[in-house]
Amino acid sequence: MIKRELTKGEIIKQAQGLGAELVGFAPINRWEEYGDLEESFFPHKVWPLTKTVIALAIPSLLPIVETKISHLYKSQYNNTNRLLDEAAYRLAAFLNRNGHAAVNICRDGYGVGVLEEKPIAAFSHVWAGYYAGLGTIGWNHTLVTREFGPRHRLVSVLTALELDGDPMVEEKLCNKCKLCEKACPTQSFSGNNSDTYSNMDKFACMSRRKRFNGPFNHCGCCIKVCPVGEDRNLYNSTAIKKYFDEAKDITLWGSGVGANIIEREE
Protein backbone atom coordinates (compact mmCIF):
# COMPACT_ATOMS: atom_id res chain seq x y z
CA MET A 1 0.00 0.00 0.00
CA ILE A 2 1.44 3.35 -1.07
CA LYS A 3 1.45 6.01 1.63
CA ARG A 4 0.26 9.34 0.30
CA GLU A 5 0.42 12.59 2.22
CA LEU A 6 -3.02 13.89 3.09
CA THR A 7 -3.94 17.40 4.17
CA LYS A 8 -6.73 18.33 6.54
CA GLY A 9 -8.45 20.04 3.65
CA GLU A 10 -8.53 16.80 1.64
CA ILE A 11 -9.92 14.88 4.61
CA ILE A 12 -12.58 17.52 5.27
CA LYS A 13 -13.64 17.45 1.62
CA GLN A 14 -13.86 13.67 1.71
CA ALA A 15 -15.88 13.70 4.96
CA GLN A 16 -18.28 16.33 3.67
CA GLY A 17 -18.74 14.36 0.48
CA LEU A 18 -19.80 11.44 2.67
CA GLY A 19 -22.45 13.53 4.42
CA ALA A 20 -20.72 15.14 7.40
CA GLU A 21 -21.70 18.77 7.99
CA LEU A 22 -19.15 19.46 10.71
CA VAL A 23 -15.61 18.05 10.77
CA GLY A 24 -12.99 18.65 13.45
CA PHE A 25 -9.56 17.33 14.42
CA ALA A 26 -8.24 16.64 17.92
CA PRO A 27 -4.74 15.41 18.81
CA ILE A 28 -4.86 12.79 21.54
CA ASN A 29 -2.83 14.89 23.99
CA ARG A 30 -5.90 17.04 24.61
CA TRP A 31 -7.54 14.22 26.58
CA GLU A 32 -4.59 14.14 28.96
CA GLU A 33 -4.10 17.91 28.98
CA TYR A 34 -7.67 18.70 30.07
CA GLY A 35 -8.21 15.63 32.23
CA ASP A 36 -12.00 15.60 31.94
CA LEU A 37 -12.24 11.82 31.56
CA GLU A 38 -10.68 8.77 33.12
CA GLU A 39 -7.64 7.50 31.23
CA SER A 40 -9.43 4.31 30.23
CA PHE A 41 -11.61 6.43 27.93
CA PHE A 42 -8.68 8.12 26.15
CA PRO A 43 -8.48 7.43 22.39
CA HIS A 44 -5.17 5.57 22.54
CA LYS A 45 -6.65 3.26 25.18
CA VAL A 46 -9.44 2.39 22.76
CA TRP A 47 -6.98 1.91 19.89
CA PRO A 48 -3.24 2.16 20.68
CA LEU A 49 -2.18 3.53 17.26
CA THR A 50 -4.35 6.63 17.59
CA LYS A 51 -2.64 9.99 17.09
CA THR A 52 -5.60 12.07 15.95
CA VAL A 53 -9.36 11.87 16.42
CA ILE A 54 -11.56 13.14 13.60
CA ALA A 55 -15.01 14.16 14.87
CA LEU A 56 -17.95 14.23 12.47
CA ALA A 57 -21.41 15.69 13.02
CA ILE A 58 -24.63 15.41 11.04
CA PRO A 59 -27.54 17.68 12.02
CA SER A 60 -30.98 16.64 13.14
CA LEU A 61 -33.18 18.99 11.14
CA LEU A 62 -35.05 21.33 13.49
CA PRO A 63 -38.56 21.04 11.97
CA ILE A 64 -38.37 17.27 12.39
CA VAL A 65 -36.98 17.60 15.92
CA GLU A 66 -39.95 19.83 16.72
CA THR A 67 -42.37 17.02 15.90
CA LYS A 68 -41.06 14.84 18.70
CA ILE A 69 -42.28 12.72 20.28
CA SER A 70 -43.13 11.19 16.88
CA HIS A 71 -42.39 8.43 14.41
CA LEU A 72 -41.06 11.12 12.08
CA TYR A 73 -38.38 12.07 14.59
CA LYS A 74 -37.51 8.44 15.28
CA SER A 75 -37.06 7.87 11.53
CA GLN A 76 -34.71 10.85 11.25
CA TYR A 77 -32.79 9.68 14.32
CA ASN A 78 -32.26 6.24 12.81
CA ASN A 79 -31.40 7.61 9.36
CA THR A 80 -28.75 9.99 10.70
CA ASN A 81 -27.26 7.17 12.75
CA ARG A 82 -26.93 4.96 9.67
CA LEU A 83 -25.45 7.81 7.66
CA LEU A 84 -22.96 8.58 10.44
CA ASP A 85 -21.72 5.01 10.68
CA GLU A 86 -21.37 4.74 6.92
CA ALA A 87 -19.57 8.09 6.65
CA ALA A 88 -17.14 7.19 9.44
CA TYR A 89 -16.43 3.75 7.99
CA ARG A 90 -15.84 5.13 4.51
CA LEU A 91 -13.62 7.93 5.82
CA ALA A 92 -11.54 5.38 7.73
CA ALA A 93 -11.31 3.29 4.54
CA PHE A 94 -10.18 6.40 2.63
CA LEU A 95 -7.38 6.98 5.15
CA ASN A 96 -6.36 3.32 5.07
CA ARG A 97 -6.34 3.33 1.27
CA ASN A 98 -3.87 6.20 1.37
CA GLY A 99 -1.56 4.44 3.80
CA HIS A 100 -2.75 5.95 7.10
CA ALA A 101 -4.17 3.44 9.57
CA ALA A 102 -7.64 4.37 10.80
CA VAL A 103 -10.71 2.84 12.44
CA ASN A 104 -14.22 4.16 12.95
CA ILE A 105 -15.97 4.10 16.31
CA CYS A 106 -19.70 3.52 15.80
CA ARG A 107 -22.05 6.18 17.13
CA ASP A 108 -23.83 3.84 19.59
CA GLY A 109 -23.19 0.13 19.74
CA TYR A 110 -25.19 -0.76 22.84
CA GLY A 111 -28.77 -1.94 23.28
CA VAL A 112 -31.13 -0.29 25.74
CA GLY A 113 -30.93 -3.27 28.08
CA VAL A 114 -27.14 -3.03 28.32
CA LEU A 115 -27.21 0.72 28.91
CA GLU A 116 -29.87 0.35 31.55
CA GLU A 117 -27.51 -1.80 33.57
CA LYS A 118 -24.41 0.33 32.94
CA PRO A 119 -24.98 3.60 31.03
CA ILE A 120 -21.34 4.11 30.06
CA ALA A 121 -19.87 3.99 26.56
CA ALA A 122 -16.33 2.92 25.69
CA PHE A 123 -15.64 6.23 23.92
CA SER A 124 -17.34 9.62 24.12
CA HIS A 125 -18.14 11.29 20.80
CA VAL A 126 -19.32 14.36 22.74
CA TRP A 127 -15.92 14.95 24.31
CA ALA A 128 -14.22 14.14 21.01
CA GLY A 129 -16.32 16.85 19.37
CA TYR A 130 -15.39 19.26 22.15
CA TYR A 131 -11.66 18.58 21.84
CA ALA A 132 -11.95 18.81 18.05
CA GLY A 133 -13.37 22.33 18.25
CA LEU A 134 -16.93 21.60 17.12
CA GLY A 135 -18.60 23.06 20.21
CA THR A 136 -18.81 23.06 24.01
CA ILE A 137 -20.45 20.81 26.59
CA GLY A 138 -24.06 21.69 27.41
CA TRP A 139 -25.97 21.46 30.67
CA ASN A 140 -27.65 18.27 29.40
CA HIS A 141 -24.31 16.58 28.57
CA THR A 142 -24.64 17.13 24.81
CA LEU A 143 -22.23 18.92 22.51
CA VAL A 144 -23.63 22.38 21.78
CA THR A 145 -22.51 23.81 18.43
CA ARG A 146 -22.95 27.28 16.97
CA GLU A 147 -24.60 25.84 13.89
CA PHE A 148 -27.12 23.41 15.35
CA GLY A 149 -27.07 23.79 19.12
CA PRO A 150 -27.34 20.20 20.42
CA ARG A 151 -29.45 19.06 17.45
CA HIS A 152 -27.00 16.75 15.73
CA ARG A 153 -25.50 13.28 15.93
CA LEU A 154 -21.80 12.53 16.33
CA VAL A 155 -19.30 9.88 15.34
CA SER A 156 -15.51 9.56 15.48
CA VAL A 157 -12.66 8.22 13.38
CA LEU A 158 -9.37 7.33 15.07
CA THR A 159 -6.27 7.54 12.92
CA ALA A 160 -2.53 7.02 13.24
CA LEU A 161 -2.02 10.07 11.02
CA GLU A 162 -0.71 13.01 13.04
CA LEU A 163 -2.61 16.19 12.20
CA ASP A 164 -2.79 19.62 13.79
CA GLY A 165 -5.78 20.06 16.05
CA ASP A 166 -8.48 22.61 15.32
CA PRO A 167 -8.89 25.51 17.77
CA MET A 168 -11.25 24.63 20.58
CA VAL A 169 -14.31 26.80 21.11
CA GLU A 170 -13.56 29.16 24.00
CA GLU A 171 -16.99 30.79 24.16
CA LYS A 172 -19.43 28.96 26.43
CA LEU A 173 -22.23 28.23 23.99
CA CYS A 174 -24.47 26.89 26.77
CA ASN A 175 -25.58 29.74 29.06
CA LYS A 176 -27.19 27.38 31.59
CA CYS A 177 -30.71 28.61 30.93
CA LYS A 178 -31.76 25.13 32.11
CA LEU A 179 -34.68 24.87 29.71
CA CYS A 180 -33.50 21.32 29.03
CA GLU A 181 -33.83 20.60 32.74
CA LYS A 182 -37.35 22.04 32.84
CA ALA A 183 -38.42 20.12 29.74
CA CYS A 184 -37.08 16.74 30.84
CA PRO A 185 -40.03 14.41 31.54
CA THR A 186 -37.93 12.28 33.91
CA GLN A 187 -36.26 15.17 35.76
CA SER A 188 -32.88 13.68 34.87
CA PHE A 189 -30.91 16.93 35.22
CA SER A 190 -30.04 18.80 38.41
CA GLY A 191 -27.30 21.02 39.75
CA ASN A 192 -26.15 24.56 40.44
CA ASN A 193 -24.86 27.21 38.06
CA SER A 194 -21.41 26.73 39.56
CA ASP A 195 -21.35 23.24 38.03
CA THR A 196 -19.80 22.88 34.58
CA TYR A 197 -22.78 20.78 33.52
CA SER A 198 -25.66 19.08 35.27
CA ASN A 199 -25.71 16.01 37.42
CA MET A 200 -27.47 13.61 35.09
CA ASP A 201 -29.51 10.66 36.28
CA LYS A 202 -28.74 8.39 33.35
CA PHE A 203 -30.86 5.58 34.75
CA ALA A 204 -33.94 7.83 34.81
CA CYS A 205 -33.24 8.90 31.23
CA MET A 206 -32.88 5.30 30.08
CA SER A 207 -36.03 4.22 31.90
CA ARG A 208 -38.08 6.53 29.68
CA ARG A 209 -36.68 5.01 26.51
CA LYS A 210 -37.43 1.53 27.76
CA ARG A 211 -40.96 2.53 28.78
CA PHE A 212 -41.77 3.85 25.31
CA ASN A 213 -39.79 1.26 23.39
CA GLY A 214 -41.52 1.08 20.03
CA PRO A 215 -42.53 3.67 17.44
CA PHE A 216 -41.90 6.66 19.73
CA ASN A 217 -39.00 5.46 21.87
CA HIS A 218 -36.65 8.39 21.21
CA CYS A 219 -37.21 11.33 23.53
CA GLY A 220 -34.82 14.23 22.91
CA CYS A 221 -37.00 16.84 24.62
CA CYS A 222 -33.82 18.45 25.98
CA ILE A 223 -32.37 19.13 22.52
CA LYS A 224 -35.72 20.30 21.20
CA VAL A 225 -35.99 23.22 23.63
CA CYS A 226 -32.38 24.44 23.49
CA PRO A 227 -32.38 28.05 22.18
CA VAL A 228 -28.82 27.85 20.83
CA GLY A 229 -28.07 27.28 17.15
CA GLU A 230 -28.06 29.11 13.85
CA ASP A 231 -30.62 26.58 12.64
CA ARG A 232 -33.28 28.46 14.62
CA ASN A 233 -32.85 31.56 12.48
CA LEU A 234 -32.68 29.46 9.33
CA TYR A 235 -36.05 27.89 10.09
CA ASN A 236 -37.52 31.04 11.67
CA SER A 237 -38.15 29.12 14.89
CA THR A 238 -36.84 31.22 17.77
CA ALA A 239 -39.91 31.13 20.05
CA ILE A 240 -39.11 28.62 22.78
CA LYS A 241 -42.22 29.12 24.92
CA LYS A 242 -44.35 27.21 22.39
CA TYR A 243 -42.68 23.94 23.39
CA PHE A 244 -43.82 24.31 26.96
CA ASP A 245 -47.31 25.38 25.94
CA GLU A 246 -47.77 22.31 23.78
CA ALA A 247 -46.43 20.10 26.56
CA LYS A 248 -49.62 20.71 28.53
CA ASP A 249 -51.45 18.59 25.98
CA ILE A 250 -48.89 15.80 25.69
CA THR A 251 -49.67 13.15 28.27
CA LEU A 252 -46.52 11.20 27.38
CA TRP A 253 -44.55 13.82 29.27
CA GLY A 254 -45.71 12.06 32.39
CA SER A 255 -45.25 14.03 35.59
CA GLY A 256 -46.12 17.42 34.10
CA VAL A 257 -42.67 18.88 34.68
CA GLY A 258 -42.49 19.85 31.02
CA ALA A 259 -45.76 21.75 31.28
CA ASN A 260 -44.32 24.49 33.46
CA ILE A 261 -44.58 27.62 31.37
CA ILE A 262 -41.35 29.55 31.36
CA GLU A 263 -41.23 33.23 32.10
CA ARG A 264 -37.99 33.98 30.24
CA GLU A 265 -39.62 34.80 26.94
CA GLU A 266 -41.58 38.06 26.68
Image: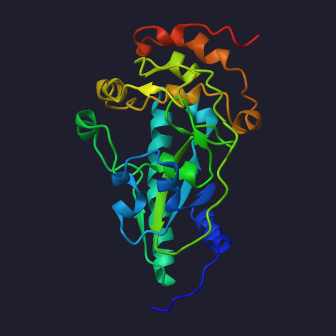
Residue 65 is situated, as x and y percent measured from the top left of the image, at 56, 33
Image coloring type = rainbow
Name the residue located 67 percent from the left edge and 56 percent from the top edge.
Answer: 167
Q: Quadrant of residue 135?
A: top right
Res 246 seen here: yes
Residue 125 is situated, as x and y percent measured from the top left of the image, at 47, 50
Res 248 seen here: no
- In the image, 74 versus 203, the foreground residue is 203
Furthest-bottom residue in view? 2
Residue 88 drawn above or below residue 222: below
Name the residue located 41 percent from the left edge and 9 percent from the top edge.
Answer: 255
Apparent side of residue 265 relative to residue 47 in the rendered image (left or right) = right
Name the residue located 44 percent from the left edge and 45 percent from the top edge.
Answer: 78
Residue 77 drawn above or below residue 92: above
Give the position of the N terminus as an image quadrant. bottom left
Apparent side of residue 127 relative to residue 11 in the rendered image (left or right) = left
Residue 123 is situated, as x and y percent measured from the top left of the image, at 39, 52
Apparent side of residue 37 relative to residue 248 in the rendered image (left or right) = left
Name the residue located 56 percent from the left edge and 24 percent from the top edge.
Answer: 194
Residue 17 drawn above or below residue 215: below
Give the position of the C terminus as an image quadrant. top right
Q: Quadrant of residue 179?
A: top right
Residue 10 drawn above or below residue 266: below
Residue 77 is situated, as x and y percent measured from the top left of the image, at 47, 42
